[in-house]
Amino acid sequence: MANITRFDPFNELARLDPFGNMDDLFKGFTLRPVFRGLEAEPQIKVDVSEEDKSYLVKAEIPGVKKEDIHVSIDGNQVSISAEIKKEKEEKEGKRVIRSERYYGKVYRSFSLDQEVDQGGAQAKYSDGVLEVKLPKKPGSAAKQLTVS
């Protein structure tokens, strides 16, 4: 019986490639350049750091009013959401050349190792960065069990 092999057309092209590795040809290939004039839907980028008695969360939410940001805490679950409203209009004289609008909501949720004391939590928003200080709830440290 004959050995069956899978045909890979890119492997065949790589053998004929006079310029080196064929993988470099497809590196960075995305559809984004097609939509160069449009803005991508924003995402919340989050950094979480832990101290002895609290967590510090830094979330990047540029272009949002602080009234449109909502932070909720439920035990060790933290949720951050924001409503984004962006309008852009370009005019030449009295004639509108281009008008764009974006309305949407971004949402990010994550769990922490320990429960958070909701009463002592503080949030501050400036320059597009939301800083949330979340004190750990006393007595809620994780307990290790010994398996017998």
Image (cartoon, grey):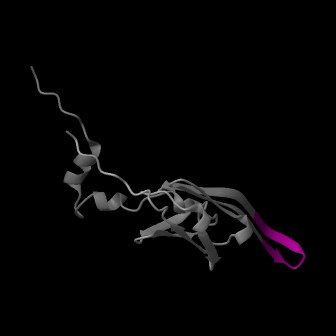
Residue plotted at (40% across, 57% down): 141
Residue toward you, 7 or 125 = 125
Overall secondary structure of the magenta section: strand
Q: Is residue 94 magenta?
A: yes
Outermost residue on the left side: it is 1
| Quadrant housing residue 25 | bottom left
Report the residue that reaches farthest toward the front. Answer: 139
Q: Where on the picture, by quarter, is residue 26?
A: bottom left
Residue at left offset 87%, top offset 79%: 93
Res 86 → quadrant: bottom right
Camera sees residue 59: yes
Residue 65 in view (yes/no): no
Pick the quarter of the image with the C terminus: top left
x 72%, y 61%: residue:
102
Q: Position of residue 50 (x, y in %)?
A: 42, 69
Image location (x, y in percent) of residue 137:
49, 61
Viewer-nearest residue: 120 or 55: 120
- Residue 129 percent across, percent down from the top left: 58, 74
Instruction: Confirm whether the magenta stretch covers residue 64.
Output: no
Q: Establish if 98 lies above or below 7.
A: below
Relative to the observer, which residue lies in front, 44 or 57? 57
Magenta span of residues: 89-100
